[in-house]
Amino acid sequence: MTTIRLNGAEADEVYLECFGTHLGMTLDTYDQLHGGFEDLFIAFAEQVTVRSGSRVTGLSVGSGRVTGLVAEENGGAYRANHDAIVVALPAHTAAGLVEPLSAHLAATLRTINYFPAAVVLAEYDRPVFPEEMRARTFPSNSLLSNAGAYGMNDRHIVRYTFSGRAFRTANPDLAALPDLGEELLGKEIDLAGATRVRAVSRRWEHAYCGYSRFHSKTIERLDDALQGIEGIFLTGDYVRGASIEACFRAGFERTDSLMAQMGTRN
């Protein structure tokens, strides 16, 4: 079940070399933000410049190094010069960004597997889960991989996650997922009398990182492909794992390496 939660993949679709990422998810502890993410984003924006309305479309390159980026904002394009760039994106998205810089680098990023998933958030007029149980997982032949309360104090909001081979094979219509989630969860807990107030559904084709065969070699090939190109480092869910904690660790590690390369950190 850990492979479904972390990778959207069945056990036979995840390589043994990536066992550590799953072990780390099991051993990590997680703190829930009682007030949501808004205060966190506000505090972050007070420390660094945030351009939430921008979309990066390319990298500026000169004399064998990355010198900045090209972006779109409010319908217009602009260029921004920077001493260095850290591309912190899923591998498939990063590939499209760096392809003009290095076709080999982009091709290596595309060897990293991703699996699709869909999520439904449904709000009900009463708590769905009892206090002693806030989530259920489902067997591999189920289109629904897990369902759980959105938070400790939000047992009336249920997150239905559809992933794994059975979901990919059936490929159900997005509009049908709220009813399907309730049907499958209703076989496990009593949903009688719970009325759905509203729901939102989303599907992502590249929702979960499934890594690549001999993944450490893939990371080495990525680093080798960057040799001779200064001013850019890569990080993402494929470096140390897909959990938020693992992504933070990878981001710190890669950024520290970049700063050391630039001579700004011992």
Image (cartoon, rainbow, N blue to C red):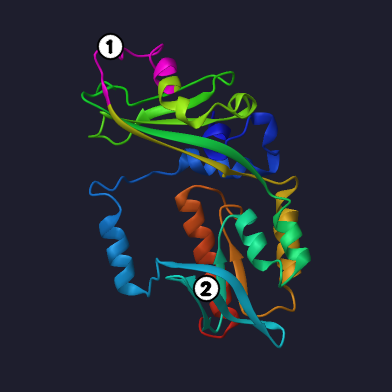
Q: Quadrant of residue 12?
A: top right
Q: Secondary structure at mark 1?
A: loop
User: Spatial distance from mark 1 to mark 2, Cα to Cα?
Assistant: 51 Å
- For the residue labelled by badge 2, is the local secondary structure a helix, a strand or a loop? strand
Q: Is residue 224 left or right of residue 44?
A: right
Looking at the picture, how far across and down is residue 168, in whole percent?
62, 30
Is residue 154 part of the magenta span, yes or no?
A: no
Q: From what the image shows, is residue 186 above or below residue 52?
A: above
Picture coordinates of residue 140, whole percent (x, y): 58, 21
Which residue type does callout 1 highlight?
Answer: Ala
Q: How many marks?
A: 2
- Between 223 and 42, the one lying in front of the other is 42
Magenta span: predominant SS is: loop
Q: Residues within 10 Å of mark 2 (few under 14, many from 20)?
A: some
Check disc 1 and report the residue beneath it: 192
Q: Nearer the viewer, mark 1 or mark 2?
A: 2
Where residue 181 sits, quadrant-wise, is: top left
Kindly identify the residue that appears in the image at 71 percent across and 63 percent down: 222
In this view, the residue farthest toward the front is 75
Q: Position of residue 201 (x, y in %)?
A: 42, 36
Q: Which residue is mark 2?
A: 71
Q: Position of 244 compared to 9: left or right?
A: left
- Residue occupying the point 57% across, 44% down: 21
Image quadrant where residue 219 sits: bottom right
* Depicted 257 relative to depicted 262: above or below: above
Q: Which residues are magenta?
A: 181-196
Of pointers 1 and 2, the one earlier in the residue sequence: 2
* Residue farthest along the bottom direction in this orientation: 63
Q: From the viewer's perspective, is residue 178 above or below residue 110?
A: above
Q: Is residue 190 magenta?
A: yes
Q: Amino acid at mark 2?
A: Ala
Q: Check the picture and name the quadrant holding the N terminus.
A: top right
